[in-house]
Amino acid sequence: MRRLVTVAFAVYVAWAAASPYAQSRRPIRDTDLLDFVWTADPQIAPDGSAVAFVRVVVERERDTYASSIWVVPAAGGPPRAMTTGRRDTTPRWSPDGRRLAFLRIVEGETRPSPAQVYALSLEGGEPTALTSLPEGVTTFAWAPDGHQLVVGSNVRGAVTPMPEPGRPRPSDARIVTRATFRADGTGFVDAGRRSRVFLVTLGDEPGKHGVSRPVGRGRLGDQDPVWSPDGSRVFFTAQTSSEPDYAPPRVVLMEADVSTGAVKEVAAIDGAISRPSPSPDGTHVAFIASLNGRPVRSYSQPDLFVVHRATGTVTNLTERYDYDIDGGLTGDQRAPRGSSSTRPIWTADGQAIVTVAAVEGRANLVRIDAATGAVSALTEGDHEVQGFTATRDGQAALLASSPTRLCDLQLGRLDRPGSFQLLAATNGDVMAALDLSEPETFWTRSFDGTRIQGWILKPSGFDPSKTYPLVLQIHGGPHAAYGATFTHEFLWMAAKGYVVVYTNPRGSTTYGQRFGNSIQHRYPGDDYRDLMAALDEVVGRGYVDPTRLGVTGGSGGGVLTNWALTRTTRFTAAVSQRSIADWEAWWYSADFTLFTPSWFKGPPWQQQKDFVRRSPIAHVDRITTPLMLVEGDADYRTPPAAGGDAMFRALKYRKVPVVMVRFPDEGHELSRSGAPWRRVDRLRHIVGWFDKWLKGEKRPEYDGH
C-alpha cells in the first residue's frame, strides 16, 4: 500500500509542477475563502481500500455551506461523491464495508428536520433511513455484527406545561432554571432536554426503521457511546451533577450490558472523561480527560488515561508528558461543518494507543505505550493533524493542514513512523495557483526570561531593504495556541502588504501545564508583556516601520487588544473583535460560568477591586489609539454589551476615533463558521481600518458624520 500511496503523491507533485497555475502564481485574495473545499472526519474502510470523508463547500447564492459524503480510493485516483444531500455528515462504514452510514438533515419548507442515520449500499442505490428518533440523532456507531446501532439523541424530559384555561395557544414563555440558559451558536437552551443513548436494532428489510430502546439511566445526561469489540457492551460517559454550572467538571465512564441492560460505573476521576476507546480484548478502556486539580486551575492539560475494567484501576499514561494530548491549534480554516472528535485508537496487539499530541505550535500523531506511557512520534513536521482513523490491522488515514496547505488527506500505518503520504489534496487547484510563503518561526525572551514562540509572515515580494507596516495578531482562548496550520486571514494580510506577527504568550496551550496555567488570576497581565517582547523582537529586525503598527485579536485576543491600548500608545490603529471590556458585566451575561474560581478568586461582589483592575473599560481614559470594534449581534460567548458596546460608547464620549461593525445573526464563531460572505466582509473591514490608519488610504465610510 505504501508504494501505491508514494506513487500517488509523486503523481500529485508532478501535476502541481506542470499545472498552468504553477506557472503564474498570484497573491491570495479575500474571496478565495469562497472557493476553498474543506475536508472533515476521515474514515478508512475496514479493509483499508478507501477513505470516506465529509466535503464542505460554499454555496454562494445561498451564502451558506453544503456538506456531502465523498470517498477516495486508497490506491489513488479522484475522489467521488457518494451523497447528494446538502447537510450530510458523519460517515461511518459498516463492519463488512458494504454500506456507508451517515447523518442527514433534510431541509423542509419551514425548518430542517432532525438529523437521522441514513445508509447507502456501495453497490448502488439511494440512501435509506435507519433511524426515526423524534428528536434526531447527534452521534452513532455500528455494532460489530452490523445488526444494531448505538446512537445519541437529545431528548425531552417529562416536562408538563402549566394549564392555560381560556388561552387559544400554548404559552411561549421560557422557564429558566439553569445558570447556563443559552449557548453561543444555538441560542436559548431547552432545559427539558438531556442527552441519552439508545440501541437501535435494524430491520431485515431495506428502509425498515429500527426499534430503539434507551441505554443507561439518562437522568443527568449520557453521551459519547462506543461498542466493546465483541458487541456485548456499550461504553458511554455520564454527567454526575444536575447543577454543574459553578463546580469543576466531573463526568464518569459507564458501561451497559446489551443483553441485560445492567449499567455500572467503570471509571471516575476528578475531571471530565471523554472519548472512551476499549482495547481489542475488551479488558481496558482508554479515554481523554483533564484533571481539575486542587486548587482549581485556570488551565488543566489533557492527558491519556486507561482503566482496567476488572479492577477499576485508572492510570494516567501521560502524567509525565507535559504537552497536550488530543490538542489542536487555532486557525480560521477548519471545516465550518462536519468536524468530529477522534477517539484514541489502540494498536492491533493492544500494546499501544495512538492519538494526537500538540507540542509547541504543532499537532502530530503519537504512539503511547499502554504499559509504560512512553511516547514516540508517528508523524512529524509543521502541520496540524485534525483527525484520523485506522483499520484493525493498523492502516490509517489522517487529515492535516499546514500554513500553506489546507485539508490534505494522508495514508499510512500506525506501526510505521513516517509512513504517511499524501492521498488527496482537496484544494490542489487553489493552492497551486497561490503564491504563499511559509511563516518564519522565532523565539524570544520575555521580561522575566520566559521563552515565547512566534511566527512572522512577510508580504509578497518582500524586500528587506524596505520598511513595512505590521499587524500583531493575538489569539483567543486564552488557553489556545497559534501554530502550523492554515489561516486565511494572516495570509491575506501579508498579501496586502503587512508584516503579520502571531505569537503564543503565556497562558497558551502546547507548552505544558505550568505555562498554560501561569495567567490564572492575572489575566490580562504578563501575557501582554510577552506580546510586547515579541513585537520588540520583530521591530528590531529593521524591516518594520515602528510608526505603523497595528494590533488585532478576537475573544481573548480582543481582551488583550483592549488591554494593550490602555498600556501603550505605540500602536497606530487597533481592531478588537468579539471582546470583553467589563469583566463584571461579562460574568453576569456570558453563556458559560466556569471562570470562577478558574479566572477570578470569587464572584464580582466579593472581588470587586480585582474585576475593576483587570477590566479595560476601567482604564479607557488612557486610550488614544483609533479603534474598530467587530461584533456579532447573536454572540452569547462575549455579549457585545460587555465588550464592544462599552468600548464604543466610552471612546465616542472621549472623542477618540472609533467605529463599530455589527454583523446581524452572527455569533462568536463568525470568523470560522459564519455566513461565507460575512466572513469575507469581516476581513475587508479589518484590513480597511488598517489601510486607513497604517497606509493613509481614504476610507470615508469610517469617518464620523
Image (cartoon, rainbow, N blue to C red):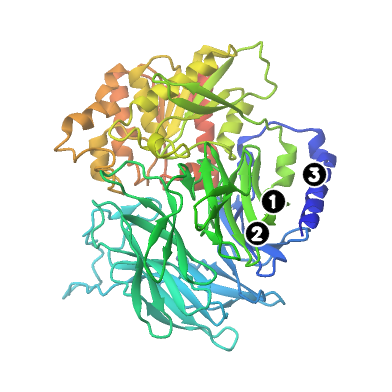
Q: Marks 1 and 2, Cα distance to the nearest angstrom?
A: 8 Å
Instruction: Please state the horizontal and vertical placement of residue 41, each as a whole percent of the image.
Output: 58, 58
Horizontal side of 429 relative to 669 (left or right) equals right
Q: Marks 2 and 3, Cα distance to the nearest angstrom?
A: 22 Å
Residue ID for mark 1? 420
Residue ID for mark 3? 13
Decide which of 387, 173 is in the foreground and name it.
Answer: 387
Horizontal side of 12 relative to 506 (left or right) equals right
Mark 3, Cα crowd under 10 Å, few <14 / some 14-19 / many 20+, is some
Instruction: Please state the horizontal and vertical placement of residue 336, each as a whole percent of the image.
Output: 53, 51
Q: Is residue 696 above or below residue 62?
A: above
Callout count: 3
Confirm or deny contact between disc 1 and disc 2 (CB under 8 A).
yes
Task: State the residue at coordinates (66%, 67%).
Answer: 45
Task: State the residue at coordinates (24%, 25%).
Answer: 618
Task: Check disc 3 and report its element: helix, strand or loop.
Answer: helix
The amino acid beneath tag 2 is Ala
Quarter of the figure with residue 393: bottom right
Residue ID for mark 2? 396
